[in-house]
Image (spheres, grey):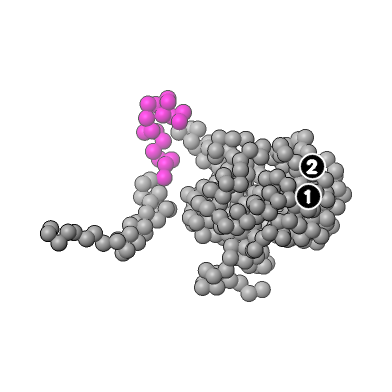
Amino acid sequence: MVYLTGSEAARASAGERFRALLGRPEILQMPGAHNGLAALQARAAGFEALYLSGAGMSASMGLPDLGIITIEDVCFFIRQVSRSAGLPVLVDGDTGYGEVLNAMHMVRSFEDAGAAAVHLEDQVLPKKCGHLNDKKLAAPDDMAAKIAAAVKARRHLHIIARTDAVASEGMDGAVARALRYLDAGADAIFPEALYDREMFREFARRVPAPLLANMTEFGRTPFFTASEFAEMGYKMVIWPVSALRMAAKAQEELFAAIRRDGGTQKMIPRMMTRNELYATIGYHDYEALDASIVRTVTPSSG
């Protein structure tokens, strides 16, 4: 595998850069980044790819993760995250926002916004977080048709098929669906809400494809590290809503402190300073760029 670096990487599409990362021997680690600032912070920490969670995008809009947000809502997040950090972004595509033609429209829209990869799930609307109960599944052939349509529509986007079937159809049902989705053209498989180490290992043994693991907190999956997922046979791992949960808790505590103390004085040590924030977003780099391009011209009479 030839790794893309320098000018090659600059010319490569987002999907090609994502595939290059998957071509390396180590597991690809993708934290959830719910906005451009989070994306910049994740890149500064050393991550090379990012994840955009449907739950994270919905929650940041003050909405539940029930398939309410639209393709255009998601494209807004894709544009800011991919532009700010310049890293390949895997995007939660929910159920494809409808049927076959909707899934094709989603693929092209996400590519145009800057996405590198998308995962589609085999639930029907109103969809639910994969770690909740009473999920309703699409027929395997209907989901396979969406996958085939997404593959047909893409120019470079990496297509990952997610199955939520373990909860209602067991391991055999989930494996059968995964193999059907691979036949339809999926590049990788995302088995959602597996709940012990042996389940992860069994799925990896039975499904010969790159696999994505979801390390969400407060769900059915026990805590595993990236290296543990790699040992179990997984090529990618996401932490979808971790950053949002941390930020939301900090905001909650800040607002409570202002209400209690009449100001932010007790919270100052926990804040990012102005200089730290400016350094993170490259404030002075933008100033320098502006100065290098635009020079104030005074009237000749002045």
Residue of label 1: 143
Residue of label 2: 137
Verify CB contact (< 8 Å) between mark 1 and mark 2.
no
Determine the image quadrant of residue 272. Answer: top left
Identify which amino acid the numbered label 1 is placed on: Met
Q: Nearer the viewer, residue 209 or 119?
A: 119
Residue drawn at x 65%, y 52% as measured from the top left: 105
Highlighted magenta segment, given as a residue range:
255-272
Residue 73 shows in the view: yes
Q: Position of residue 237 (x, y in %)?
A: 67, 54
Residue 234 shows in the view: no
* Cα separation between marks 1 and 2: 9 Å
Q: Position of residue 75 (x, y in %)?
A: 56, 50
Q: Is residue 299 magenta?
A: no
Which of the image's four quarters has the C terminus? bottom left
Mark 1 vs mark 2: which is more N-terminal?
2
Which residue occupies the extreme left position in the image?
A: 301
